[in-house]
Amino acid sequence: MTGAMRIAGFAVGVVAVAGVAAAVGLAVGPLDRGHDDSGGHGGDGHSTTAMDDHAAPPGLAVAQDGLTLAPRVRTAAAGTTAEYAFRILGEDGRPVRDFDVEHDREMHLIVVRRDLTGFQHLHPRMDPDGTWRTPLRPEAAGTHRVFADFSHEGDATTLGVDLGVPGTAGHDPLPAPAATSTAGAYTVRMQGSAVQRGTESDLGFEVSRDGARIGDLQPYLGARGHLVALREGDLAFLHVHPLDDATAGPSVRFRVEWPSPGRYRLFLQVRHDGRIVTTPFTVEVRS
Ligand SMILES: [Cu+2]
């Protein structure tokens, strides 16, 4: 009862900020609920995704479903490149060594400061003993979150662990929702909708360079691009599915599952002229 009232009160605040999104051209409206949801995520009636109110979103736990993320270090120095090593341990405490290829790789490592700045997407390499290693350079002090995103025996899993970066840490406020984001000469425009609680939305991203729309995005990680979506406050790692069958094209589309109302930071990565272009977006999801 009080919980419901709290959510209702929260919704009023969300609507106020959603007005900002509309003002900058981001379409805000209810999602088309007509599409069939039974096919994509298992459809056995027991599949638990972020759509299930009782299932926690991925990325919040260091151990889940018998798998544990075991980092070798808990801290790293700002502005310094050092090796970040970790293992994924199974229920028997031994390192898992057989991973499925998802999005072209067996392991994706996402690193971001807790205020959702300093995003990095890395691809560690595994030693024969199951130890994953990658160079890592946190740019700024402050607690970071490290996500290991992988699939083992057909189950997609995202585990998360904190990484302390000592020093005087700032905490940047999340930028307001906006439909465009720039990186160097590149501008990306997001087309899509903020949606109701517990639903999904389809988001499209159109990339231009020096004002001209790009028609030749290159394949990246087996798709036209890669999208990471994180929730403000706890950095829950959202389920994101690429929607395009072809790996190249003028724009890139994803289906994102929103676990709750609130604000999210999206990190779009596309490849063009051999470069990875990363653009962040803030999205407001209404109740
Ligand atoms: Cu990756």
Image: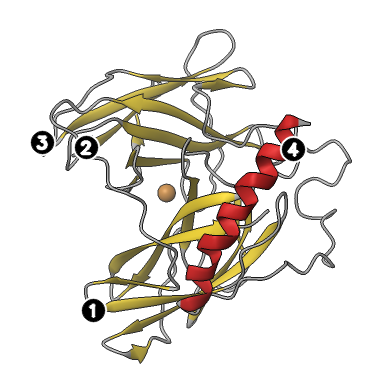
- Between marks 2 and 3 in the image, the one whose residue lies nearer the viewer: 3
* Residue at the spot of label 4: 4
Where is residue 284? Give x, y as percent.
54, 58
**Dividing the picture into quarters, in which one does residue 143 lie?**
top left
* Residue at the spot of label 2: 135
SS assignment at label 2? strand
Q: Quick check: marks 3 and 4 in contact, CB under 8 Å?
A: no
* Residue at the spot of label 3: 80
Question: Which residue is pictured at 45% across the width and 58% down the height?
Answer: 221
**Disc 3 to disc 4, C-alpha distance:** 46 Å
**Disc 1 to disc 3, C-alpha distance:** 27 Å
SS assignment at label 3? loop
SS assignment at label 4? helix
* Residue at the spot of label 1: 185
Q: Quick check: marks 1 and 4 in contact, CB under 8 Å?
A: no
Say if 265 sits above or below 1 in the image.
below
Question: Which residue is pictured at 14% across the width and 35% down the height?
Answer: 78
Q: Mark 2: give few (<14), some (14-19) or many (20+) Cα within 10 Å.
A: few
Question: Which residue is pictured at 37% across the width and 33% down the height?
Answer: 145
Q: Nearer the viewer, residue 246 or 30?
A: 30
- Between marks 4 and 2 in the image, the one whose residue lies nearer the viewer: 4
| Residue 260 in view here | no
**Disc 2 to disc 3, C-alpha distance:** 10 Å
Tag 1: residue type?
A: Ala
Q: Nearer the viewer, residue 93 or 146?
A: 146
Tag 2: residue type?
A: Pro
Which of pointers 1 and 4 lies earlier in the amino acid sequence?
4
Q: Quick check: marks 4 and 2 in contact, CB under 8 Å?
A: no
Q: Nearer the viewer, residue 132 or 142?
A: 142
